[in-house]
Image: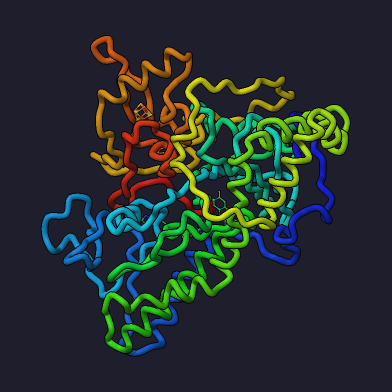
Amino acid sequence: MLGVKEKFDVPAKLCPKSFDKNGYLVLSLSHVVGWMANQIEEKAKEVTNVTIDLFTGFSAHKVAIENERVVGVAVTENATSEDDYVYGKFTAFGDKGFISRDVVDHYKLRDCPQIWSVGVKEVWQVEENYEGKVWHTLGFPLLEGTFGGGFVYGMKDNKLTIGMVISLNSKDPNMNPQLKLQEYKKHPWIQKLLKGGKLLKYGAALLPEGGYYSLPKKFQVPGALLLGDALGVLDVKNLAGIDRGLECGYIAAEVMYDALLKNDTSDEALAPYQKRLEESFVVKDLYKNRYFRYAFIENDKLLREYLPDIAHSIDKSNAWIGGMKVFFKHPLGATKDGFRSLGLIEGKFDIGPISYQHDYKYIDPGFVAPKYDEPPYDKSTIYSRADAVFYSATKYHEGNQHIDEFNADVCVKCISTYEALNKTTPCVADCTAEVHRIDIVDEIKKHGMSLENCVHCRTCEMICPEVNLRVKPTEQGSGPNFSGL
Ligand SMILES: Cc1cc2nc3c(=O)[nH]c(=O)nc-3n(C[C@H](O)[C@H](O)[C@H](O)COP(=O)(O)OP(=O)(O)OC[C@H]3O[C@@H](n4cnc5c(N)ncnc54)[C@H](O)[C@@H]3O)c2cc1C
Ligand code: SF4
Ligand code: SF4
């Protein structure tokens, strides 16, 4: 638990069991995926009549649907001829919504919207070796009520991964996740870890947080199925998405293989996929933890009042005194809230189905974030958004247009609304890179974009209050370089 200046180590006994990862490895997913690609290509060489093609530089741009069946994807943005498509008996979608949302929308699969958080992350080369050490933190700098936390992972070769996962259903229209990460790094404990260090990489990506009630009604549709984050199986309580994504992959592969052996490509051929996932730990855990995220939405005092009280008490005395203060300040309220919220967090009650709103609907344009005195810090460890982009090694082809703005007039109105409140628009404030900007054209303030800076996280799309943006897949292998993140 972090106060603004001090930290409090929560006793291991009080940490959820799922956090006990003694003996596990800390790995960069980008390396794991590269390793898996080599393994599968080598394996294929041993099997006659099997060819594995991995087209890593190609994005799927559009879902091809014929007679209500998914038949493949377009692999160019403006597909005009058959050569622009890849067809398959089955298509598996595992992208974080870039095009899988079109499958979800076309077949009306989701009644309860998905809610998202954004993970912002830096990799540092540091003086000391922290290999294998993992810290998860609550509190500073999220003391204004937004759900989320920080993490520090010690990697080999004196590398340190530092990041924050921050929910996008924040009330604050100017929440700015990249700035929050910089504030996090100003904490004296992290400053000490970074001493003499050098920034190597920066990146950002979304995580689906809705869990059980945001799952699509069907995990498969005729000719296609949804995997991992596209399906939304990340278990936010257990901080686990990778193993769930892998499990989807294993089961999907077996189901598709069985269907192909039987030469069965009927609409029902993929039905065992959902059934097997529902019987696996993937959906069972989601069900068990179905109210975890909701508990913090239902009662915003947990993060807006109680957590800051405890965090500030860490700076003054200790967390236990903060806990007592919360109790004495609101004797009845805190007991009632604690009972109800802990019950939901631990899955002890059943309150029936719940529903979320889209992330942007939680924004309160007039929200005022509390201020606190910053601890002293080494300025060379802090990076502006524009400078951080350099470390994500983005590279785009000429003429790249991967974000659509649907209506420029809507933006003009949005800019003036937020300016009247002494704020900037959510897209400008919350972009994890330096993409969205306000230009003055003919004396009118208009929305503009420097797309070459985009780290391709989709945050802006989720928090635009007017649903006026769409972040599309990039072309020709363009985009940030996630390798090593
Ligand atoms: C900062 C951060 C920290 C995390 N930490 C952990 C952790 O410690 N443990 C854990 O279990 N989980 C963690 N997660 C969650 C975990 O990374 C995800 O749940 C998991 O990677 C989901 O796997 P996936 O295969 O569904 O999607 P992804 O890993 O997102 O893979 C999707 C792939 O599809 C590609 N793609 C996207 N669009 C297209 C397209 N149109 N055409 C072709 N390819 C496309 C992408 O480039 C990507 O390679 C973390 C997430 C973040 C953001
Ligand atoms: S893109 Fe959305 S958030 Fe940005 S200015 Fe336009 S309407 Fe506002
Ligand atoms: S423009 Fe949107 S997708 Fe690109 S980095 Fe900014 S928030 Fe992420």
Task: Decide if residue 155 is in sight here.
Answer: yes
In the rendered image, the quadrant that contains the N terminus is top right
Image quarter for residue 178?
top right
Considering only vertical position in the picture, is 325 above or below 119? Answer: above
Q: Eyeballing the image, is 318 above or below 289?
A: above
Above or below, 84 relative to 175: below
Q: Position of residue 92 (x, y in %)?
A: 35, 67
Give the quarter the ligand 3 occupies: top left
The percent position of residue 294, horizontal first and vertical second, equals: 58, 47
Q: Nearer the viewer, residue 301 or 160?
A: 301
Q: Residue at x 28, y 34 (%)?
A: 405
Q: Percent x, y for residue 303?
A: 67, 36
Q: Is residue 57 left or right of residue 352?
A: left
Residue that extends furthest to the top in the rendered view of this protein: 443
The residue that appears at 39% across and 36% down in the rendered structure is: 453
Residue 337 in percent (x, y) is at 72, 40
Residue at the left extreme of this rendering = 81
| Residue located 49% across and 64% down the image | 33
Q: Residue at x 87, y 34 (%)?
A: 321
